[in-house]
Amino acid sequence: MLPIPAVVAIVLGYLALRTLLSGGRPLLVMMLAACAGQSLLVALVGGYALQPLRLVLPVSATLIPPLAWITFRDALVRRATLRDAWPHAAAPAFTLFCRLFAPQTLDIVVPLVFLAYGGAILWQLHRVSEAPLARLAAGGMPGLIWKALGWALIASAIGDGLIAPALRGGHAGWAGWLITLSSSLALLFVGLLSVSPEATGPDDEARESAEPELSNAEIAENAGILARLDGLLRREQAHLDPNLTLARLARRLHLPEKRLSAAVNRATGENVSRYVNLWRIRHACKLIEGGASVTEAMLTSGFNTKPNFNREFRRVTGAAPSEWPNLAHASATEPAIADPDRCFRAQ
């Protein structure tokens, strides 16, 4: 008989506790806890008529979008520092100011905060082609997850914006359902997305900044950088690490992340993730030809999700993994992998 927001609060609280006990990132724990707390407040106000808490709801709500933005940056772009985080306290602080001195503006301020941070996440994902801290094995999944989270914030803003007109129009029942859908379900969606294994990079990712950019005399041509990358992958089998990231590759090559990404893109027409996956698929092909199962080849070659492995395998080879043994045995020549001279010249 619990109201829906209370059930959502229990689920999000459990996720926050599990993330904390499993050693998850503090920012992620804070965001989940904030979502759980907000859903609990909605339950207490809407389900149990604790009206004094209604005064707190707008301020606590505007804690969530900044936390989502900081968590997004910390997960995929750059490890967050206190200097990065503290300016975003302006959102809940301004909301508190409005709550005390201009409460009539809250119907505009709160949705705008959600809209601004949701749009910022989407713009960042559109502007940056690669996330330095994302696992390369995850392919485009981290971007899709955080894109969905950005749209969830925007959807919550739209829902909040419709509540006030519903109340003014005498449709209190509609307003109640809008509160449930725009807050509780959006909060649940944000929480479930943020704890996805593909939403963040490895927990042990080093937090030091990237190497300083080399001088023009020291920077090799794009082909030279690609050759250094090929040598690293061939020598150290780095592509077999499922937790490999662009940031790690750049540090091991003593290059800035953007320089390595640009060099690979200009020399091959592929981003770093897809280029590393070419090496992984070649490794998987050899294992499958040697009698390994598809699952064993997937896990041994640096992939950790079946859909991503199947998608990349078909992109590179033009066939499904299960079809590869027959195709390999039918030809005595080098496996017919798309553009092998470009993709596998190092091997």
Image (spheres, rainbow, N blue to C red):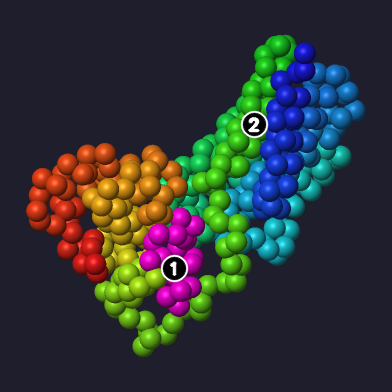
Describe the element under mark 1 as helix, strand or loop.
helix
Of the image marks 1 and 2, the number of the one nearer the N terminus: 2
- The crowding category of the residue bearing disc 2, from other C-alpha atoms within 10 Å (few below 14, some 14 to 19, many at least 20), is many
| Residue 136, picture quadrant | bottom left
Residue sitting at 33 percent across and 56 percent down? 280
Residue sitting at 27 percent across and 48 percent down? 291
Residue type beneath disc 1: Leu
The answer to whether any part of residue 151 appears in the image is yes
Q: Is residue 230 above or below residue 101?
A: below
Residue sitting at 33 percent across and 43 percent down? 294
Specify the quadrant that holds the C terminus: bottom left
Q: Which residues are magenta?
A: 237-259
Q: Which residue is mark 2?
A: 188
Residue sitting at 14 percent across and 47 percent down? 329
Task: Using the numbered discs, state the Cα–Cα distance from disc 1 to disc 2 in whole angstroms.
Answer: 35 Å
Q: Position of residue 49 (x, y in %)?
A: 86, 19
> Which mark is drawn over residue 70?
none
Tell me, yes or no, whether the highlighted magenta stretch contains residue 245: yes
Q: Position of residue 12 (x, y in %)?
A: 70, 34
Describe the element under mark 2 as helix, strand or loop.
helix
